[in-house]
Image (tube, rainbow, N blue to C red):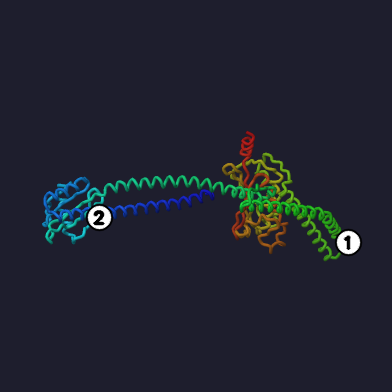
Amino acid sequence: MNVATRFTVVVGGFLLVVIAAMSLSFYVLSKQFYYEQLEKDITSRLLAHREILEQSWAADTQEHVFWMEQRQEDNVFLILNEQFEPMMAGNTHDQRWIKRYVDWIQSNDVNDQVTLELVHVMEEHIPHVWATVPVHQGGHVAGYLFLDHDTGLFEHTRTNLVMLTAMMGALTLLLSGALLYGLIRKVTAPIKTVQKATKKIAKGAFDTRLPVHGSDEIGDLMGSINEMASRLKQLTESRNELISNISHELRTPLTYIKAYAALLKKREGLTEDGKDQAMIIHEEAIRMERLVGDLFELMKLEERNVSFHLTKTDLEAVVERSVRVSTIEGKKKNVTLAIHKEHSPLFSLVDSGRLEQVMQNLLSNAIRHTPSNGTINLTLYAEDRKNVISVSDNGEGIDSDKLPFIWDRFYRADRSRNSKYGGTGLGLAITKQLVEQMGGTIFVDSEKGKGTTFTLIFAKEEEVEAKKLEEIG
């Protein structure tokens, strides 16, 4: 989920909560306001009726008051005598309900004020407001007025209001979400551009440049990244030029040192100590010569200045040739090299010579780190549209926190063992460059104390051809 989507979801969720809270608050407040106004209206009506009836408790006055309330069909209005017997009952002739009304009046401590209650016991599940007030004549209670007010109209209005609020909330959320998503995409578009550019720069494409628009923070960031890329390019070019010059300048003196050390070893009359010293000089000269060669090769690989002849290659044949060459080195430590073929044949478009160089580097590295009488297993198999080669040893393994750095030049997982294992410290860096520039992938798995596995993955030959045809088409 990208930034725009995440931000839209978060803000949309916040808006949803706000809209829901506002809708709920509006409903609660409107309901409270309605009931307050309804209570005031009922109270004023009953008090007005009582005032008229207290002036005249005659039948015609009762009929007049009864007729005014009878016009509201959803309400039930009763006039009862002092024994709670109905004198007039409007909009109901159900004696069960009349008895329930009378029981309610008798259960309440009716005084001179209007007594009201919101009742939820109706079969229709619609709240009703029940209210009663006594009527006095000559200082004593002559009867009672009772009103059952149906709130169904409000409940219907409430339902419509809730639906309308929900629809408006959904529409508001949809429109604001779309507007917000578009706005955030516009704001984050430069950030995505920066992200893509920095990934390219991290991979060594220092010619990458960002278009700088405006003088805001993002514009300043793009300008800084461009300056960083330019500086990195200068540093890389300076470094490569330095390595090239050093490699070139060292080759000639190293050749002389190696040659004179070889002659010195054969010189007559030289003591044994002298011969040993001459041999050490000769071996170190060879190692330095190999280091200079590896440095020069790595520099050319990083500059993409190495040509590859990609042809249909039988991976099994390359692995077998590499094993034959490395078997001699393995026998010195009594290390066994075993090939396991789960699928055969396996064809990929690679440079067979470069792939053999990769295998030699991996096998040499595995032999150095495998104990005597150990085993190195090479496995070849096909997986989906890819061919896989794995090289596994049962050596000391590498700590997980050091694995990401093994591809760095001159990096050694255990620096205390440099003299024991030898090597230039550039083999894995060269190997990674070779594999990736042939279109493959290499990764490593290792467990301390159990061993290390390097895995090479190349696309099948037919998959590469199909991709080329798609690009041409």
Q: To which quarter of the image does residue 36 belong? A: bottom left
Q: Earlier in the sequence, mark 1 or mark 2?
A: 2
- In this rendering, the answer to whether 192 lies above or below 133 is above
Q: Using the numbered discs, state the Cα–Cα distance from disc 1 to disc 2 in whole angstroms.
A: 125 Å
Which percent across, then down, holds residue 305? 74, 46
Check disc 1 and report the residue beneath it.
Answer: 268
Instruction: Name the side, left or right, on which 6 lies relative to 410.
Output: left
Residue at x-position 54% and y-position 50%: 3
Label 2 sits on a secondary structure element that is strand
Q: Nearer the viewer, residue 405 or 96?
A: 96
- How many marks on residues? 2
Instruction: Give amino acid for label 1.
Output: Glu
Farthest residue to the right: give it: 269
Give the crowd class for mark 2: few <14, some 14-19, many >=20 residues within 10 Å. some
The answer to whether residue 377 is visible is no
Instruction: Give amino acid for label 2.
Output: Leu
Label 1 sits on a secondary structure element that is loop
Residue 25's label in the rendered image is none
Q: Nearer the viewer, residue 121 or 90?
A: 90
Q: To which quarter of the image does residue 334 belong? A: bottom right
- In this rendering, the answer to whether 266 lies above or below 211 is below
Q: Nearer the viewer, residue 359 or 266?
A: 359
Which percent across, then down, holds residue 308? 71, 43
Which percent across, then down, holds residue 408? 68, 56
The answer to whether residue 280 is visible is yes
Residue 118's label in the rendered image is 2
Which percent across, then down, holds residue 48? 20, 54
Quarter of the image that includes the C terminus: top right
